[in-house]
Image (cartoon, helix red, strand yellow):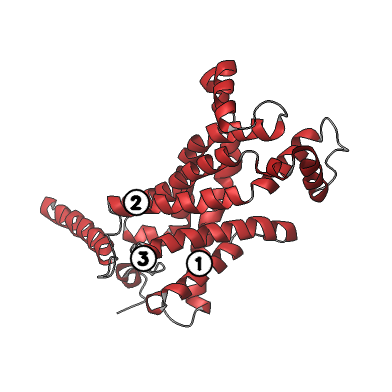
Amino acid sequence: IKNLLTGECNTHTHAVTQQLSCLSSEGDSCEFGSQKYFLLCGFGGILSCGTTHTAVVPLDLVKCRMQVCNHVNPDKYKSIGNGFAVTVREDGFRGLAKGWAPTFIGYSMQGLCKFGFYEVFKVFYSDLLGEENTYLWRTSLYLAASASAEFFADIALAPMEAAKVRIQTQPGYANTLRQCAPKMYAEEGLWAFYKGVVPLWMRQIPYTMMKFACFERTVETLYKYVVPKPRSECSKPEQLVVTFVAGYIGVWKGLVARIIMIGTLTALQWFIYDSVKVYFRLPRPPPPEMPESLKKKLGLTE
């Protein structure tokens, strides 16, 4: 009995390892789940989040000022368009870029952890579940992996987010990150950079869980019912189109403004992230399929 159990465990471990190894084709630059793979995924996260969030700094600045200043002077920022006009009138066009440095640094670090750790936790939880349960509970796997990744991503983001908000919403406090960070530390110590981490968790973790789970299942659905050929037969540009469409579909539920801003931002993040994978020739596992062992248990195959 002991030998039998040991044999089953060794067989299962070998099967999982063999499955991961087979995911790397001859054209891939590294093995799926290797250290190089995770590092390059993290680099893709840096580019996808750092660039997209920096690109919308003017809009983010006006939004933050509307949220903060409307409690004091509700007539100052009546709308998004009015907010842009007021900002340009008071600070010039350069004023629209206030907070770009902490935004780029903060969201680059967040992207590193969000996407890099997501891949790490996805493999880690998959190994714990085993091949069959990974397929059966794949949505829960995506939710757990993304939540775990975002927990650390927000810790990385919090210091720069705190500085960004000070620069954008407190006139005269500081104009640059080099001015803001030492001033915050002198006034409140290290806590000044992390007192907003809990609200970040409350905002970002649920959003990221939905973002990743919806994306993964949407990609799976598109390849199953929409794309007329398997992913392995699709060209790289065709796969990137599926990625962009899946990123767009997976994040909106009815609001036009949200479709335009959040939908486009998220779709671009997935597109840039997947483009990095394509450029560095990272292994790209096919959409999940029911394992043969599970098909046999369910009587779906002879």
Image quadrant holding the C terminus, namely: bottom left
Q: Describe the element under mark 3 as helix, strand or loop.
A: loop
Residue 285: mark: 3
Residue farthest to the bottom? 228
Q: Residue at x 77, y 47 (%)?
A: 84
Please tell me how crowded label 3 is: few (under 14), some (14-19), or many (20+) other residues with Cα within 10 Å. Answer: some
Residue 63 lies left or right of residue 108; in this view the side is right
The image shows residue 37 at horizontal and vertical percentages of: 32, 55
Task: Kindly report the distance in space between the C-alpha atoms of the residues bearing marks 2 and 1.
Answer: 19 Å
Q: Residue at x 50, y 66 (%)?
A: 243
The image shows residue 28 at horizontal and vertical percentages of: 29, 66
Q: Is residue 282 above or below residue 47?
A: below
Task: Kindly report the distance in space between the C-alpha atoms of the residues bearing marks 3 and 2.
Answer: 14 Å
- The tally of labels here is 3
Please name the amino acid that badge 1 sits on: Thr
Residue at label 2? 38
Label located before the other in sequence (2 or 1): 2
Residue 294 lies left or right of residue 46; in this view the side is left
Please name the amino acid that badge 3 sits on: Pro
Task: Please state which of residues 204 and 41 is positioned toward the viewer in this rendering.
Answer: 41
Q: Are marks 1 and 3 in contact (CB under 8 Å)?
A: no
Residue 144 can be seen, yes or no: no
Task: Please state which of residues 233 and 122 is positioned toward the viewer in this rendering.
Answer: 233
Residue farthest to the left? 3
Task: Kindly report the distance in space between the C-alpha atoms of the residues bearing marks 1 and 3.
Answer: 14 Å
Q: Is residue 196 above or below residue 233?
A: above
Residue 278 can be seen, yes or no: yes
Q: Is residue 245 above or below residue 160?
A: below
Residue 243: mark: 1
Please name the amino acid that badge 2 sits on: Phe
Q: Residue at x 37, y 65 (%)?
A: 284
